[in-house]
Image: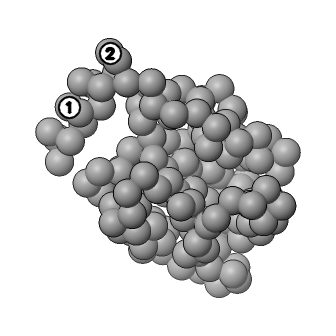
Amino acid sequence: MLFIANDHAGVKLKGILLEYCQTHNIVYTDLGVSTTQKVDYPDIAGLLCREIDLAQDSKGVLICGSGIGMSIAANRYRNIRAALCLNPYMAMLARMHNDANVLCLGERLLGNEIAIAIVESFLGFDFEGGRHTQRVAKLSDYI
C-alpha cells in the first residue's frame, strides 16, 4: 500500500502523482488536502506516519513546498525513516541503504517529470540488507 499526503503547498504535485498511480495500477490512499487553504504540515505528516506504522510493508509520499518540513516531522515518529530526495539516485539509495519507508518531495523544487522519476525509483528498489541492517536497526534506539 502506498499512502500519499500533502499540505497546501503540494496540491498540484499530489495530483500529478495520483494520476501516475492510477495509470500504473498502483494501489494508494490519499490522505492529503485538495485545496490551497493553509494547513500545518506536522498534522499531515502525522496522519501518514500513523498509517505507515499500522500497515506492514507500506510506503508513503509526503509533499510540501520544499519537502524539508515534512521530512523533519515524519522522522519524529517511531518506525518511520523519511528521506527528502531531489533525484532518482537519492531515492534509490534511500531505499537500498536506509530502508526509507517515506519519501518527501518539495513541489516548489521539482518539475513533474523528475518528481515522477523519483517516485518510480523509490518504489522500484528494495532494502538490500547486509551491512545496512545493523545501521538501520540502530535508528530505533534513538527514539
Q: Residue at x 61, y 74 (%)?
A: 30
Within 10 Å of disc 1 (Cα), the crowding (few <14, some 14-19, many 20+) is: few
Residue at position x 32%, y 15% in the image: 131
Q: Amino acid at mark 2?
A: Arg
Amino acid type at circle 1 is Lys
Q: Are marks 2 and 1 in contact (CB under 8 Å)?
A: no
Above or below, 10 relative to 128: below
Work out whether residue 1 can be spotted. yes
| Circle 2 residue | 131
Where in the figure is residue 81, as x and y percent of width and height? 38, 44
Looking at the image, which residue is at 69% across and 59% down?
A: 26
Tell which residue pokes out farthest to the top in this image: 131
Mark toward the start of the polypeptide (2 vs 1): 2
Q: Is 127 on the left or on the right of 36, as rendered?
A: left
**Residue 32 numbered mark, or none:** none
Quarter occupied by residue 64: bottom right
- Give the labeled residue for mark 1: 138
